[in-house]
Image (spheres, rainbow, N blue to C red):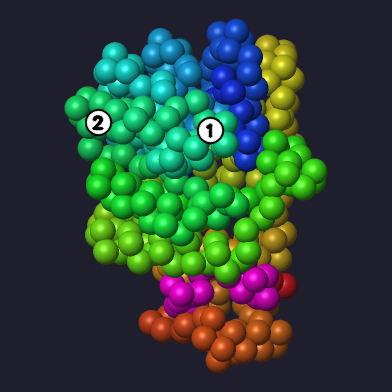
Amino acid sequence: MILAGIYIHIPFCSQFCSYCDFYSVNQTEKVDDFTEALVKEIVIRSNDLKNKGLSVNTVYFGGGTPSLISIPSLKAILSALYENYPLSPAGVKERTIEVNPDDITTQYLDGLRECGFNRLSMGIQSFSDQHLKWMNRRHNTQTALNSFELARKAGFSNISIDLIFGFEMLTTKEWKENLLKAISLSPEHISAYQMSIEKGTTLHRNYIKGAYLQPPDESSARQYSMLQEELAKGGYIQYEISSFCKPGLYSQHNSSYWDFTPYFGFGPSAHSFDGTFRHRNFSSLAKYIKTMKAGESFGPSHKQSLKERFNEYIMLSLRRTEGIDKEVLEKSFKKFIKHQFQSELGRLTEAGFLLEESGKIRIPPEHLFVSDGIIRDLFV
């Protein structure tokens, strides 16, 4: 029986990070209406999972800022899941919620434990107060350190932290200090993302005005290499371009995306994949609440062509250090792995950008930073 993950999108933010383009709103007065609509969506779509004979392996609350939601609201959402889907608190191996350091209190952490969450994803991003202020983050370094310690004391033994590199004011020395501070906390998982300029963000507007300059690729590449080296020395294993973990403690939920495992997303802008169709909910809180109250359709679906599935398989597989499974290529995508693909594969392998071994095709660690270009060359 295929295992599916469930994603819950909590769209609320009390202030917006300068770089973030995820769907979010500063309308916390609508939390109750949102919770009611979300519970209704969970109930309405319950047959989607039952009819496909799937069981649930992971639950992930992302955002936005899920830690702005009260414990009673979280309990109501989880109760709707447990009552309407083939899952139980004991049966779901990984139950993650994203938290901001400045929302953390002992009382709130105890409430999260009562809800059954066994993994935290903490948006620290930087251990520099100057950089946090520039990012328009609400917390400072000391708050992040205190929050991590509180989470440990509350009994959370599986914590992931996020970091950001590759932005104009970040020096290599500062990045190394960030990494060493992160390693000293000894989280089970570290995700590190290169700063990107996304349309509609404050960062993008500053870039257009000339108030922000992108750092040279060489600088970001050095910081990425340092990320790999320092985390390896700290006992972390890289299993995906941006993801590092202690042995065996990879993100099971995110891995389900990369493995083409079906997953179900609830809430505004959330994505779902049932194995054939991809679906996205409306990216509007007002429209989402109105639609749910009326019991109407909540967003478009798209049936992937075989070509789209092939390109997506190439992209998702090469993002992981495990790489492409050649047996899957032969079995599922034989029509696409002929002349052009073989020619590009040979060229990239000869140049050292790809390795073929043990039935796998993968990007060696030293070239993961330029993976986007390698992946594009293999698309059909």
Q: Amino acid at mark 1?
A: Lys
Residue 242 vertical placement versus 371 (above, below): above
- The residue lying at 65 percent from left, 22 percent from top is 25
Tell me: 52 left or right of 16: left
Residue 115, percent from left and from top: 33, 20
Residue identifier under label 2: 149
Residue 367, percent from left and from top: 51, 74
- The residue lying at 76 percent from left, 40 percent from top is 205
Report helix, strand or loop for mark 2. helix
Tell me: 124 left or right of 206: left
Q: In the image, which residues are magenta?
A: 360-378
- The residue lying at 42 percent from left, 57 percent from top is 173
Front position among marks 1 and 2: 1
Tag on residue 133?
1
Residue 83, percent from left and from top: 41, 20
Q: CA distance from mark 1 to mark 2?
A: 22 Å
Quick one: label 2, few (<14), some, or many (20+) residues within 10 Å? few
- The residue lying at 25 percent from left, 31 percent from top is 149
Q: Check contact, mark 1 vs mark 2: CB within 8 A.
A: no
Q: Amino acid at mark 2?
A: Glu
